[in-house]
Image (cartoon, rainbow, N blue to C red):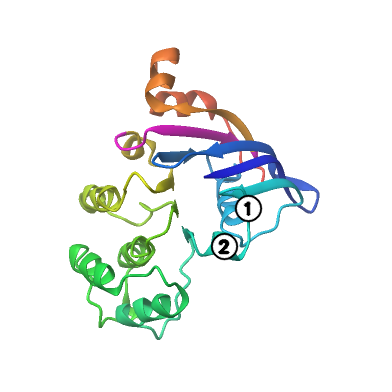
Amino acid sequence: MLECKNLIKKYRNKAAVDDLSLQLETGRIYALLGPNGSGKTTFMKIAAGLVKPTSGEIFFEQQPIGVFSKSQVAYMPTEAYFYTYMTGKDVGLYYQDFFEDFSMEKYSALLSTMDLDPSQKVSKMSSGMMAKLKIAVTLSRNAKLIMLDEPLNGIDIIARDRIIRTILDSFTPEKTFVLSSHLVDELEKVIDHAIFIKNGRLILEGDAELIRQEHGKSIVDMYKEIYAEVVPSF
């Protein structure tokens, strides 16, 4: 579904993504792993068509990232990106205007599942409520590739299981999910493929179960081993 070859993105001569070659296949749930500054968000933004690479190639269904891919890729950033005057309902209407694959019916159902009041203004929402709102509106698109950057940020421990179940309920074999999170133990329960990135470079990737068998360690333990004593450089 998505393929990048020798992908590089530099900011002031510092590579946020450094010679990254990777393939994402349809029907899989990927964990994109790494500490802050590892290049996860930059990679997602390139795949979403929001950032242009310095060099290298990236394709969605064998086509360069562009108008077509943007209609098929849903990306949820870590930042709050709604106008503060909007209500939860306004956010849905906003997405409905931009994306043909957006379902207001599904959005309303997800707001209910997450105990969000559609009449409440964004400016009055807590960080946890905002996190759930971003997930709800992103999952309400019928996109082929759905990328959620730190979807569990701001979510209390009690609500995490519900959020994860909601994400899994939205998954179908025709879709690909990419989930980025520091809460590796939470992701390990649901992902079938792990991608470890360090300083913008691919360190390890593969089927999660095969990684466990080959290394004799959990994904959490592999994370601890790979990123021990890592100091983010940007």
Foreground of the two, 104 or 42: 104
Q: Estimate the x, y position of residue 163 in percent, counting from the top left.
A: 27, 53
**In the rendered view, would you say 159 is above or below 87?**
above
Q: Specify the amino acid type for callout 1.
A: Gln
For the residue labelled by badge 1, is the local secondary structure a helix, a strand or a loop?
strand
Residue 203: quarter of image: top right
Indicate which disc residue 63 carries.
Answer: 1
Magenta-span inclusion, residue 42: no
User: Looking at the image, how many numbered discs can be counted on the residues?
Assistant: 2
- Assign a secondary structure to mark 2: helix
| Residue at point 61%, 32% (across, down) | 202
Point 33% across, 67% down: residue: 133
Question: Furthest residue to the bottom?
Answer: 85
**Viewer-side residue, 63 vs 126:** 63
Position of residue 136 measured from the top left corner of the image (x, y, whole percent): 32, 64
Start-end of magenta stretch: 189-200
Q: Residues within 10 Å of mark 2 (few under 14, many from 20)?
A: few
Q: Tell me if mark 1 has few (under 14), some (14-19) or many (20+) residues whose alpha carbon lies within 10 angstroms of its own.
A: few
The one of 57 and 178 positioned closer to us in this rendering? 57
Q: With 133 as the anchor, is 61 left or right in this view? A: right
Asked which quadrant contains residue 201, the reply is: top right
**Which residue in the protein does label 2 denote?**
68
CB atoms at circles 2 and 1 under 8 Å apart? yes
Q: Is residue 117 visible?
A: yes
Residue 197 belongs to magenta span: yes
In the displayed structure, 13 sits above or below 74; it is above
Residue 125 picture location, percent across and down: 32, 73
Is residue 77 visible in this depiction of the protein? no
**Tag 2: residue type?**
Phe
